[in-house]
């Protein structure tokens, strides 16, 4: 649900060393004395931080932040399995569920994160961590359709929903997100099924739906390049994460965003502390800081995804993105779902997805 780092930047970036973001004044309390360390290791998605949040945190608390980036939840999981140690991770919902089940996370000490009270209702008590015992929401959003209002009538996309992707009037003019889970979500929702179904017949029907789309529509399968392409109006319809859609709509006034009535994926990326974290006290301080108004505002304005800080979320929705239909996620819609972790299903959908694209 995030923009990837350019490959040339590599995997590891030490912000304090490469950008001069160290503390410019002595903190009131020695961080080593208070936290046991003056260095925090963060593992997160590329381009998923505000412009100043890391330097502000370093300066305020007199610490250094080392950031390493991953481009998929599975890559992150592999690094953890290999024994790598980080203080804070920002994975997605279904992966957090998996990490909890495998005892790879430590519980959050909520007494150390008073800013949890600012969380907006839409990210509280989600199914992957019902009591927010192990995770603190960071960004959230949905998946929907970005479309060119000059070529696709709003009433048509509202009427057809996900099936607009199979409307041959737009053959050769759509982008599908190159993700088996998201693509099968689209197909299953279009057919009226749960995106977390384990029913073989429903999965087979969704597979056939995607095969037909592939054969009749000649879709382009993309990931983050969809952002620039839709900004430039390269195609008329695209499956897009809401945060990326926010950026597209902000840059191209001809584009709009729609969440089909058949339902969609509501996702939530959250901050967690691994079981083998070396600096859990500093990790808690960082998580609490990231929920503060200034940090959350910097994050959401820079990245485009919806803030989990309720005040920031609504301030931005009513001001900077008042005319942007993609920014504010849909809440409490009965047909929307959060992905659950199921390794067998993930592998099955992955195999079927390869067959779809091989046609």
Image (spheres, grey):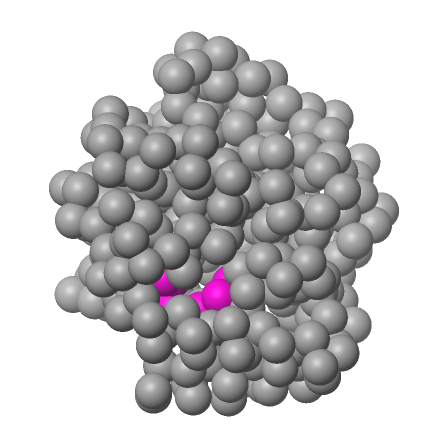
Q: Is 182 covered by the magenta stretch?
A: yes
- The reply to whether residue 80 is visible in this rendering is no
201 and 196: which is toward the camera: 201
- The reply to whether residue 214 is visible in this rendering is yes
Q: Residue furthest top?
A: 319
Residue 44, percent from left and from top = 45, 56
Vertical arrangement, residue 352 with respect to residue 272, above or below: below
Residue at horizontal 33 percent and vertical 71 percent from the top = 216
Residue 314, percent from left and from top = 56, 17
235 and 297: which is toward the camera: 235
In the image: residue 269, left or right of residue 113: left
Q: Which residues are magenta?
A: 176-183
* Number of numbered discs on residues: 0
Residue 351, percent from left and from top = 51, 88
Residue at horizontal 78 percent and vertical 72 percent from the top = 101
Quadrant location, the C terminus: bottom left
Vertical arrangement, residue 150 with respect to residue 36, above or below: above
Question: For residue 7, what is the image quadrant?
Answer: bottom left
Residue at horizontal 23 percent and vertical 31 percent from the top = 150
Question: For residue 215, what is the image quadrant?
Answer: bottom left
In the image: residue 82, left or right of residue 303: right
215 and 317: which is toward the camera: 215
């Amino acid at each position: 649900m995030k923009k990837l780092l350019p490959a040339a930047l590599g995997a590891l970036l030490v912000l304090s060393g490469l950008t001069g973001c160290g503390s410019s004044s002595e903190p009131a309390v020695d961080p080593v004395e208070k936290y046991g360390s003056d260095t925090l290791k963060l593992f997160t998605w590329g381009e998923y931080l505000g412009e100043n949040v890391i330097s502000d945190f370093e300066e305020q608390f007199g610490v250094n932040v080392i950031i390493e980036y991953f481009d998929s939840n599975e890559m992150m999981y592999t690094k953890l399995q290999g024994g790598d140690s980080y203080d804070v991770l920002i994975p997605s919902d279904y992966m957090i569920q998996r990490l909890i089940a495998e005892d790879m996370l430590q519980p959050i000490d909520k007494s150390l994160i008073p800013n949890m009270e600012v969380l907006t209702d839409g990210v509280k008590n989600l199914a992957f961590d019902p009591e927010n015992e192990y995770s603190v929401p960071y960004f959230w959003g949905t998946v929907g359709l970005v479309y060119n209002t000059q070529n696709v009538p709003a009433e048509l996309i509202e009427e057809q929903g996900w099936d607009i992707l199979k409307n041959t009037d737009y053959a050769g003019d759509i982008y599908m997100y190159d993700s088996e889970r998201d693509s099968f979500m689209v197909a299953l929702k279009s057919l009226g099924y749960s995106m977390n179904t384990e029913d073989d017949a429903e999965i087979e029907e969704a597979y056939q739906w995607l095969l037909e789309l592939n054969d009749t529509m000649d879709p382009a399968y993309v990931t983050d390049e969809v952002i620039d392409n839709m900004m430039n109006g390269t195609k008329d319809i695209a499956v897009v994460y809401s945060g990326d859609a926010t950026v597209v709509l902000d840059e191209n006034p001809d584009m709009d965003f729609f969440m089909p009535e058949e339902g969609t994926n509501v996702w939530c990326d959250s901050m967690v502390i691994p079981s083998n974290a070396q600096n859990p006290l500093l990790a808690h301080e960082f998580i609490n800081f990231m929920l503060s108004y200034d940090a959350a505002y910097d994050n959401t304005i820079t990245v485009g995804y919806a803030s989990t800080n309720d005040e920031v979320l609504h301030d931005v929705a009513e001001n900077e993105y008042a005319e942007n239909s993609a920014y504010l996620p849909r809440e409490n819609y009965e047909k929307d779902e959060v992905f659950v972790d199921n390794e067998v299903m993930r592998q099955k959908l992955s195999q079927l997805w390869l067959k779809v694209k091989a046609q």
